[in-house]
Every structure is written in structure tokens, then in C-alpha cells.
Amino acid sequence: MDEILLVGGGIGGLATALALGQGGVATQLFEQSPAFTEVGAGIGLGPNAVRRLQGWGVWEALQAKGFVPSQLVVVDAKNGQQLGCLPMAKAFEQRYGAPYLTIHRADLHQVLSDAVNAQGLSALHLGYLLQDAKTDALCVNTQWLAPDGQTVWHESQAMVGADGINSKVRELAWPSQQLQASGHWAYRTLLPRHVLPAELRSDAMGLWLGPRLHVVHYPVRGGEWLNVVVLVESNDAAQTPGWDSQRSAAQTTHDLNLALQGCCSRLQDLVRMSESWRAWALFDRHPLQSADDMARGRLTLLGDAAHPMLPYLAQGAGMAIEDAEALAQCWSQAELSVEQRLQAYAQARWQRVAKVQARARRNARLFHASGVLAWGRDAAMRWGGAAVMDMPWLYGR
């Protein structure tokens, strides 16, 4: 019987396999997709995540594929005036022991996958669809639909659901926990930096704030491409979450044009540089209430399966990486039972991720504010500068 079964071969699942492997723990990793494909777009990794990745020995590979922004520049989307600036790069290294990294999700996934394969302690099974899971006093029994259409069973000491926002593990063991539609859509594109105006070829991250929208852009893929994300509030709410939702060209154009009304020409020109946008319907869950929301008996959840959050702190991947490290640390406590180790992991994590979930929701209101709330937000950044924009509580742990 295997020690740990990992469900989901995304960033959370691979990070967990890598972290456990650092302690010599072998895993079986089951992924429902028949092959890994290039999904998603750019993501940000704060110093809290980068420090852990450095500890796992993958920093050199990440540097080659990612980008370290020099600063974060916040701009008023309506008039194009700068609201604030947060030095990053060396400033973050000095303050937090690691920089902020921007990277394409597929590149991060590839680096983690290569590291797990090199470690040689995780067996990967592609194209397996989880059907059912039962636990008893000794093990977890799982039923799978194999790629050839046959039903297969698997036994393990523990099962980790790292299978994303539409988690089958959560559906089976935590059926009452429902996703919440935010009414927000993220439209994502990549632009080659060499064709951009000089100001968009800088080493900075850009964040534009306006009523019912914000726009973020930053370099990825070694600085060759600019990742652009337009996040808007739409009257057309999605029914299901998804990285690449079916959104017609007319719907996309309508949302972008409506959101950009009243925005400055510089921002409108940037958005109009691309005719190819991928839509991401944003969902989350209410912030976790207890450790029971993450672990029950021999089953536990990790990453978006446990705590899906809005991307307004750029911490979805970061929290999954933190989860992976914490789970590996708790699993190494051999004097504890399987159930006690998983409960220790959940106890160590639930309050931290609940705070991040809540802060991400708060940022959704602040970033898209108008009227008095927007005036107060802008004034705080102008007067407080980097001290207001930095987040030691998040990056320093």
C-alpha cells in the first residue's frame, strides 16, 4: 500500500510531490488529463512562495523562464496619473530574503514537473478520472476510470486532493462546500514586448485601477512577452469556473468596451493591441472556518481544492506552494498517526489561507471602487507610498 496518493497534477500536486520527495516520501500522482498542456497565462509568485521554491532547488530553472520586476507602479485608469510605486527586485530580496517573480503558468508547471521527475519518487498516472473514495481504519480506497475505459482500484494511507477549483475530492468528502460566483471575468492575453511602446517595455509591473475594473501587466518568459489581464465586473455571470471559458468574441468585446469607458487613451490603446483574449470566470469560496474544512480523517485538500480565492492578491499558486511545504513538514512527524499528521497540517494552514481569501475579496472592492472609497484608496497610496502598498504579513511568512 502506498503512503500518499495525490489527486491532481497541477502546480499544487507537483509542489506537494516535490516537497514530500525532499523527505524521501514516495507518492502516486493521478491526473485526469491525458497529457499536460499549456494552460493559463502569467502568474505572480511573491517572496513567500519563491523562498520555498528556492529551498526545493528549482530557483535557477525558474529564473531562466521567469522575470523579476523592478517595481510595481499603480496608475489611475481614468486619467493615467501615477498613484503609487512599490520598489521590488533588490528591495524585496533585502526585506524578505527572496524576490517577486512573474512567470507563465505553463513554465512554472514544467519546472516543477522536471524536478519531480528528476527526484524519482513520484509515479505519474495520466488520464485517470476519480470515481469514488472510501476510507476505513487502515487506508483510503479509491476507484478510477482508466484511460482504456477500465475501472481500477487503488489503496493508500492518505489521499491529498490537489485537483483544483472543481475538485472531485472535495465533492466526495465535503459536498456542502459550494463555490461562489464573483460576477468578475478576467480577460488574458500575451503580447510580444518588442512591438510595444517604450513605456511598456520597462521592467516594472503595471496596475491600473478604475471603476468596476482593473488591469495588470508584467513581463513573462524571460521578459520576451507581456502578460496582460483585464479584470472586469460583468452583468453576465458565469455558471461554472474555468481557465478558458467559452466566451464569444461579441461578449468579450462588449465586456472590454464597457469596462474601458472613461479610461485614459494609454490604457485603451494597450488593450486594443490584442484581438485574442482568453476568458477566465472568477469563483471563490467563503473563507475557511476551521481545520475541518481542509482535513478529515485520511483525506485532505490543498491549494484551490481547499481554498479557491480571487486573484486580487496573486496568491493562488503561492498558497498551494505554502500548503505543500506545510504538509511535507507535518507528514515527517512519524510519531503521529496518519490522521494526526493531516490534522496538524490543516491546523497550521487554515487561518493563514482564510485571511488571504478574505483580503483578496477586500481587494476586489478596493481595486474596482468609485466615489469616496476610490478617493480614500488613491489618497492612501499617494501619501503612504510603498509603506501602504507593501504586505509584510503576506510576504514575510
Image (spheres, helix red, strand yellow):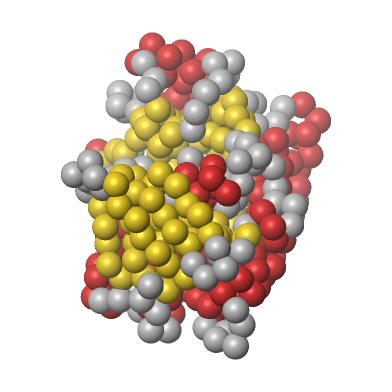
Q: Position of residue 384 (x, y in %)?
A: 74, 55
Question: Residue at horizontal 39%, vertical 47%?
Answer: 130
Q: Position of residue 21 (x, y in %)?
A: 38, 78
| Residue 387 in the figure: left or right of residue 169 | right
Q: Position of residue 361 (x, y in %)?
A: 68, 41
| Residue 141 in the figure: left or right of residue 57 | right
Task: Count the labels in the image.
Answer: 0
Q: Position of residue 173 (x, y in %)?
A: 58, 49
Question: Residue at horizontal 60%, vertical 79%?
Answer: 337
Of residue 339 and residue 254, the one placed in the foreground of this image is 339
Q: Vertically, is 245 above or below 305?
A: above
Q: Toward which corner of the image does residue 110 lie, by quadrant? A: bottom left
Question: Residue at horizontal 56%, vertical 74%?
Answer: 338
Q: What is the residue that sits farthest to the bottom in this orientation?
A: 335
Q: Quadrant of the N terminus?
A: bottom left
**Residue 162 seen by the camera:** no
| Residue 84 in the figure: left or right of residue 186 | right
Q: Toward which corner of the image does residue 319 lie, by quadrant? A: bottom right
Q: Quadrant of the C terminus?
A: bottom right
Question: Residue at horizontal 36%, vertical 60%?
Answer: 154
Of residue 133 and residue 264, the one placed in the foreground of this image is 133
**Residue 163 seen by the camera:** yes
Q: What is the residue that sits farthest to the front in this orientation?
A: 137
Q: Toward which corner of the image does residue 197 lie, by quadrant? A: top left
Q: Vertically, is 319 above or below 183?
A: below
